[in-house]
């Protein structure tokens, strides 16, 4: 186990371990001790790097939200026309819904925290604004807001459905929402 200055990525490993544990056990199942063990760091590193579990969780979820915005950006950045943007959104929904179950769990855990606690609600609001800003490069603001909600809903429904709708259904939903 690396220590001190020879371990410049310790904080990042702690944050990654926290997200891994949340995905496996839920927020209620994490503790400093479990995170330290998963990250392979001494327990004292937890209080050295974070004032408490709330700071650690908020920073971990902030990094996760940044990751998800980057996923949006990768899908939407090359779209030059509105039709290409519609197809990019369709691809995004399918990428998210067919991706790791870990992502679905992390999003739901974050939303649960956001429903109960203001710092997480503020984090979700920032994430939504950033996602909508990416969509607004291709669609009017009101359409981007509706489309962002559609992405969330279709992703969840496709991920949990025993027989998820195919791309044509997603494509048609995106077309209808964006046909202003």
Image (tube, rainbow, N blue to C red):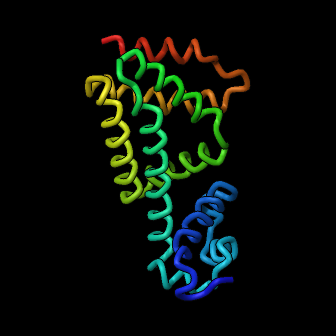
Q: In this view, does 67 lie to the left or right of 119?
A: right
Which residue is painted at 58% across and 12% down in the image?
A: 168
* Count of picture labels: 0
Query: Which quadrant of the figure contains the N terminus?
Result: bottom right
Which residue is painted at 64% across and 48% down in the image?
A: 102
Q: Where is residue 95 in the image (x, y as percent from the top left)?
A: 58, 33
The quadrant holding residue 131 is top left
Q: In this view, does 4 lie above or below 17?
A: below
The quadrant holding residue 34 is bottom right
Q: Position of residue 55 (x, y in %)?
A: 44, 70
Which residue is painted at 69% across and 56% down in the image?
A: 24
Q: In this view, does 54 lie to the left or right of 94?
A: left
Which residue is painted at 47% across and 69% down in the image?
A: 54
Q: Where is residue 154 in the image (x, y as percent from the top left)?
A: 54, 26
Query: Which quadrant of the figure contains the C terminus?
Result: top left
Pick the residue in front: 173 or 119. 173
């Amino acid at each position: 186990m690396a220590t001190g200055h020879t371990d410049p990525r310790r904080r990042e490993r702690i944050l990654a371990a926290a997200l891994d544990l949340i995905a496996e056990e839920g927020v209620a199942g994490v503790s400093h001790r479990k995170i330290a063990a998963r990250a392979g760091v001494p327990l004292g590193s937890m209080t050295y790097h974070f004032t408490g579990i709330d700071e650690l969780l908020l920073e971990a979820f902030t990094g996760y939200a940044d990751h998800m915005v980057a996923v949006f950006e990768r899908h939407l950045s090359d779209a030059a026309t509105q039709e290409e943007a519609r197809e990019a959104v369709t691809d995004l929904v399918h990428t998210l819904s067919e991706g790791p179950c870990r992502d679905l769990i992390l999003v739901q855990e974050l939303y649960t925290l956001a429903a109960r606690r203001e710092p997480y609600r503020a984090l979700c609001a920032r994430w939504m604004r950033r996602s909508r800003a990416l969509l607004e490069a291709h669609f009017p603001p009101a359409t981007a807001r509706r489309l962002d909600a559609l992405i969330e809903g279709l992703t969840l429904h496709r991920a949990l459905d025993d027989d998820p709708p195919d791309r044509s259904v997603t494509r048609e939903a995106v077309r209808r929402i964006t046909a202003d």
